[in-house]
Image (cartoon, coloured by chain):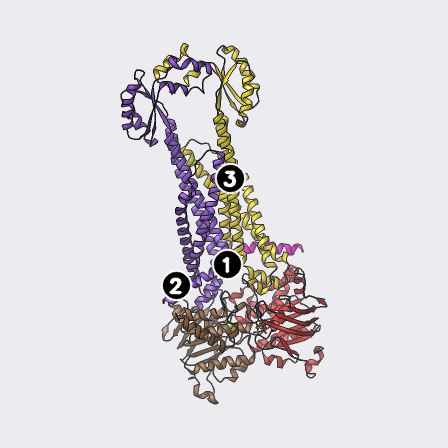
Chain colours: A yellow, B purple, C brown, D red
Amino acid sequence: MSISGFGYLIKEGLKNVWNNRMMSIASIGILVSCLLLTGAAALMSVNVQQTVKAVGESNVFTVYLKQNVTELQAVQVGENLKNIDNISSCKFLSRDEAIKQYKKDLPEEIYQELIGQGNPLPNAFKISMADLSKYSDTVTKIKKVSGVDQISNKSDLAATLTKLNNLVSTAGIWIIIILGLISLFIISNTIRMTMYSRRFEISIMKSVGATNLFVRIPFIVEGMVIGLISGLISTLGLMFVYNILMSSISNLIHYDAIPFSQMSTGVLVAFIISGIAIGALGGIISVGKYLKKEGNEILGW
Amino acid sequence: MSISGFGYLIKEGLKNVWNNRMMSIASIGILVSCLLLTGAAALMSVNVQQTVKAVGESNVFTVYLKQNVTELQAVQVGENLKNIDNISSCKFLSRDEAIKQYKKDLPEEIYQELIGQGNPLPNAFKISMADLSKYSDTVTKIKKVSGVDQISNKSDLAATLTKLNNLVSTAGIWIIIILGLISLFIISNTIRMTMYSRRFEISIMKSVGATNLFVRIPFIVEGMVIGLISGLISTLGLMFVYNILMSSISNLIHYDAIPFSQMSTGVLVAFIISGIAIGALGGIISVGKYLKKEGNEILGW
Amino acid sequence: MIEFKNVSKTYQNGTKALNNVNINIDKGEFVFIVGASGAGKSTFLKLIMHEETPTNGKIFINGTNVTNMHHRKVPYLRRTMGIVFQDFRLIDKMTVFDNVAFAMRVIGASPSAVKRRVPYILGLVGLKDKANSRPSQLSGGEQQRVSLARALVNNPLMIIADEPTGNIDPEMSYEIIDLLSEINKYGTTIIVVTHEQNLVKQFNRRVIEIGNGQVIKDSVPMPDLDNEADSSEGQI
Amino acid sequence: MIEFKNVSKTYQNGTKALNNVNINIDKGEFVFIVGASGAGKSTFLKLIMHEETPTNGKIFINGTNVTNMHHRKVPYLRRTMGIVFQDFRLIDKMTVFDNVAFAMRVIGASPSAVKRRVPYILGLVGLKDKANSRPSQLSGGEQQRVSLARALVNNPLMIIADEPTGNIDPEMSYEIIDLLSEINKYGTTIIVVTHEQNLVKQFNRRVIEIGNGQVIKDSVPMPDLDNEADSSEGQI
Ligand SMILES: Nc1ncnc2c1ncn2[C@@H]1O[C@H](COP(=O)(O)OP(=O)(O)OP(=O)(O)O)[C@@H](O)[C@H]1O
Ligand SMILES: Nc1ncnc2c1ncn2[C@@H]1O[C@H](COP(=O)(O)OP(=O)(O)OP(=O)(O)O)[C@@H](O)[C@H]1O
Ligand SMILES: [Mg+2]
Ligand SMILES: [Mg+2]
């Protein structure tokens, strides 16, 4: 095919977007809806996962030292603890500070008895783990450090948080997959309809001796343009929805959402690529159906 | 219009579903997708709300009694507490039992010192509130009961849970509204396309002297049938998806989902009604566009 | 029956299709409309059936001014006419039978009446054995005859046919115009657009020639032959 | 050029459209195909252009057996033909100009060639000032001429026209067939389906009559008049 011929076909595709503008608008509307859905699900999932991870990381365990370990000796214990990998932070908590934690839960008089000399608590370290799923391994290592007496038993929480994190990731992926499939389904049905309404055009082109490629290219270009437009609109739309949603969530509970700007490029690229790909694919697949049919056959039910 | 004429129009609508089966299938596919999305969001929201409510209800506060209140006297205090409304449960917790709660968090030797005579804790009641948002009111009433010393300060959690509940309800409603709008948008675009591809049919019917009503009824019937079929398929589909999703969630974390059977009638009725309504509306609105146009005008761009 | 008073029609793209046309067709007349391609013949018919509205002038049908008729009344106007469209306008999702029956159902005919009349009319145009075909399974001439059958089926006050024999061989064309003549005998007004001179010559009828959007000839039938008895009251 | 050997065509619904047809048309011939409505004329043309395939028999075009041609080769077969369809087959989303130009672009014509040739061809069929109209804004005869223009534009080896004058007045019909005769002089094979006896009589050419799916007459042109010089080598 000559270059001018190719240019003509591309121009034709562009014109089609305008000539079939009713259909184009409908298609763009549907494609945008689907991209928005899938995109919103993806952003939500990213946010939830980050939150769960943050909660997991901020989870703090108490490593109790033996009663005879002085604050001075504790410094060395602290060094040893810090050398264990998977321990992401390690902070000394003196017995005086420790008892203060119980202030809230205990009646005032009882609390007063316990501070100072009556304090039954030992010195301790507050540590947190980078990866909660390695909890039991890490505990074993901690217990080997000399001077360490016990570690607060929070393996239940650890397990729950790990499970929750897995759940959220899995659920997120599933939701994205399901929404993606639904979107694809909707889009492919839409393309089917569009093409169905243009089957005559295709049959006439073939009557005049157009090759399959010649018939297809404008449809593919048209699909890609619709995809591109949809991708752009979806990015703007998602930004809008996301910002509103996140600011209203932040109003209700204290929550630092990932700012959209941090993900905008990714979203834009993903949307444009998937929009164009869907459009092109739509052009390719659906025209194909009518390319093998001739004249009256195309009318057949 | 005669009864036989009316019967004919309805039959015609039914036939159309089959004659335009390509379009019918595509429409049903899109409608089912939309109903599924909105339905899934609704069920999720119901589940999450119930969970949050359950967590809220199971939230237990400790009412500490004065050190001098004996277990015998405590019975009377318990009666008084139970009389306060908004207290949904009230259970005695002796100081011996109470200290056991700290077993996990304290090093063994310390724990051993604290049980028995060394126990610094008073007798207490574990209570839970029906409505956490009335937290501070209830606390005031509790403090007025003679023999009560203090109540564990959990107003933060109370506030958070209340907020969370609000958030989930609001978010649920918003998600349903947004998905509903997107669905409506997709569906209306779909209807537009379907009608666009059938505008010739409409114009020919008018050429022959058909009144608007006569042209419309089969389209409306067709829309309703498609809606009905979509409603049925969506119910089955949602049941399937919901059961899979909930059982896989239950595998990951301990969670009692509301069984689908409990909601199936509601879902079925909602889906069928909204399916039929959307279908009928689609028939009404979209045909209207072409009813005022004549012959060649219909082709106009 | 049909009266055009200074009617002009300019299409949206600026094409002047009709220019100050005055035509009067009485009840029971049989009129041929002839003229070159693009002269304005179909536009004339479209104005009668209210598919287009005039840019200027007034149109009276059955004594009513239909120039700016409300669109809700248009269907009832059309039911007084049987129309053969130049482009056939058949619904391809319906069988031949249903295409014809549709016109009857529109006016509320009973199912039994439909069952009786449609095969009879299809027989008249020679399509009895095509009743269950779809229009796309027919030859060009067969499609044209389905359109004719649909126009005839309701025994309308007037029949308006736009090139009803354009795709039909001479013998059958003659038969069709003959059939319309027969129908005309019972008082139905007939307007036939055609470009087949042989037919116009064979049937001695009023001929209106349209050229360039204007009436350039309006000839009454010659008062001879056997046509006299049923000839229309020719007017100029 | 075109050879049908014992060709039969039965449509899917059981209609026998052609029954054991043997036809031989040489390069440079001018053939009229006549016959009653539904006789099988359009089916014959559809078999030539490979829009339908025969149920039985073999078809040779330009010496190639096209009976079961691969669908990828069909476009190249069609490019050797200019086809006027009975139902016009115009793309309504394109202007008249683009409808005609499309056929040129399909074969890879340069934009400048398109710009030069399309207006010329539109002029030949009398549609110069309709270049920017949409088909739906044209009269029936005008649409038919657009279809003709599209068939002519590529100077094809053969022109196949299905009732190209069905909606056109006699004068212009004559001009169109005359135009085809002119083109024929330069060696283009021309096949015209028509039911207009006047035209067939005016042009002294080979006439193949199809009736009930069979060739019932195949008459060579009479060897008189001035047509002799450019008359085709008639065959039976
Ligand atoms: N919808 C339209 N928009 C613009 N111009 C139109 C439209 N319909 C017809 N025309 C133009 O109006 C003129 C008259 O058209 P009309 O269809 O009345 O011709 P006609 O006499 O029926 O011709 P034919 O014998 O070819 O059918 C033509 O020049 C045509 O191009
Ligand atoms: N797609 C089809 N399916 C079934 N039957 C068909 C189909 N196309 C044509 N026929 C039938 O085949 C026969 C021949 O049709 P064809 O179109 O060849 O006739 P024709 O000679 O062109 O007639 P006309 O002059 O009316 O156009 C007719 O009886 C027609 O009903
Ligand atoms: Mg016309
Ligand atoms: Mg034919």
Tags 2 and 1 on a common chain? yes
Residue D87 higher or lower than B71, as above or below:
below
Q: Determine which residue is flagged by label 1.
A: B21
**Dot label at residue C101:** none
2 or 1: tag closer to the N-terminus: 1
The chain ID associated with circle 2 is B
The chain ID associated with circle 1 is B
Circle 1 sits in a helix, a strand or a loop, which is it? helix
Circle 2 sits in a helix, a strand or a loop, which is it? helix
Out of D153 and B265, give the one closest to the viewer: B265
**Magenta residues, as a range?**
A1-17
Task: Give the image location of residue A233, x and y in percent.
Answer: 50, 46
**Dot label at residue B213:** 2
D232 horizontally vs A73: left or right:
right
Task: Give the image location of residue A164, x and y in percent.
Answer: 49, 32
Q: Nearer the viewer, mark 1 or mark 3?
A: 1
How many numbered callouts?
A: 3
Classify 10 Å Cα crowding around label 2: few (below 14), some (14-19), many (20 and above).
Answer: some
Give the amino acid at mark 2: Leu
Task: Give the image location of residue B103, x and y in percent.
Answer: 44, 19
Q: Is residue A89 visible?
A: yes
Q: Is mark 1 within 8 Å of ligand 2?
A: no
- Please say if the residues under marks 2 and 1 sit with CB atoms less than 8 Å apart: no
At a point 44% along the width and 85% down the height, the residue shown is: C231
Q: Determine which residue is flagged by label 3.
A: A42
Image quadrant occupied by the N terminus of chain B: bottom left
Give the amino acid at mark 1: Arg
